[in-house]
Amino acid sequence: MTRLSTLALAAVLALPVVAHADMPGKHPAYLHALTDLRHARAHIEKRGGDAEMKWDEQTAIREIDAAIGEIKKASIDDGKNLNDHPPVDVKADRAGRLHRALELLRKAHKDVSEKEDNNFAEGLKDRALHHLNEAINFVEQGIANSKK
């Protein structure tokens, strides 16, 4: 085989690898959801001027952690820890933090709700959505309580 034919063959064999490098990873929506969940969790966890965390915030964090756990059970893990999130405005009051967390939870819910073609992941999706719905409910209760 000539040197030119060897190079041509190597180039043809490398095409699938190069094409695959541009393809998004499996479940990119779940990875976006993980980022939003960590960020929402940080907004709830940051107490700013609050003396202590309220019951609805603690419960919402437990539900967020459970949703993160369900997503990770399907081996959809970006390897980042809970403290890897965009900066949180520590000066925001409780209502402001909870509103931002609610927005992020709804984004994560939308991402996790996308069509799933993996039967194994379908069960995890249902459980993750259940935990997200619970977290959203508790954050909404926290917002309502902050207006009192």
Image (cartoon, grey):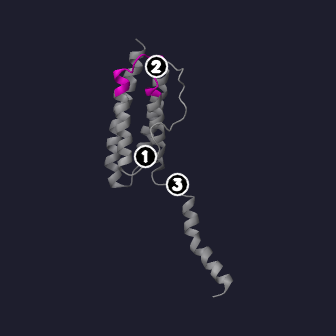
The amino acid pointed to by label 1 is Glu
Up the image or down, 116 lies above or below 69; here it is below
Residue occupied by mark 2: 94
The crowding category of the residue bearing disc 1, from other C-alpha atoms within 10 Å (few below 14, some 14 to 19, many at least 20), is few
Instruction: Quote the CA–CA distance across marks 3 and 2.
Output: 37 Å
Residue occupied by mark 3: 24
Quadrant in the rendering for residue 60: top left
Q: Give the x, y percent position of residue 73.
A: 35, 48
Instruction: Quote the CA–CA distance across marks 1 and 3.
Output: 15 Å
The residue at the far right in this view is: 4
Up the image or down, 139 lies above or below 19; here it is above
Task: Work out whether mark 1 precedes mark 3 in sequence or the reverse, and give the earlier one.
Answer: 3
Q: Give the x, y percent position of residue 134.
A: 34, 32
Q: Using residue 73 as the reference point, say whether residue 108 is left or right of it.
A: right
Q: Secondary structure at mark 2?
A: helix
The magenta stretch spans which residues? 43-58
The amino acid pointed to by label 3 is Pro
Q: Nearer the viewer, mark 2 or mark 1?
A: 2
Residue occupied by mark 1: 114
The amino acid pointed to by label 2 is Arg
Quadrant in the rendering for residue 98: top left
Contact between marks 1 and 3 (CB within 8 A): the answer is: no
Q: Is residue 120 magenta?
A: no
Task: Work out whether mark 3 precedes mark 2 in sequence or the reverse, and give the earlier one.
Answer: 3
Contact between marks 3 and 2 (CB within 8 A): the answer is: no
Q: Using residue 84 as the reference point, say whether residue 11 is left or right of it.
A: right
Which mark is on residue 82?
none
The crowding category of the residue bearing disc 2, from other C-alpha atoms within 10 Å (few below 14, some 14 to 19, many at least 20), is many
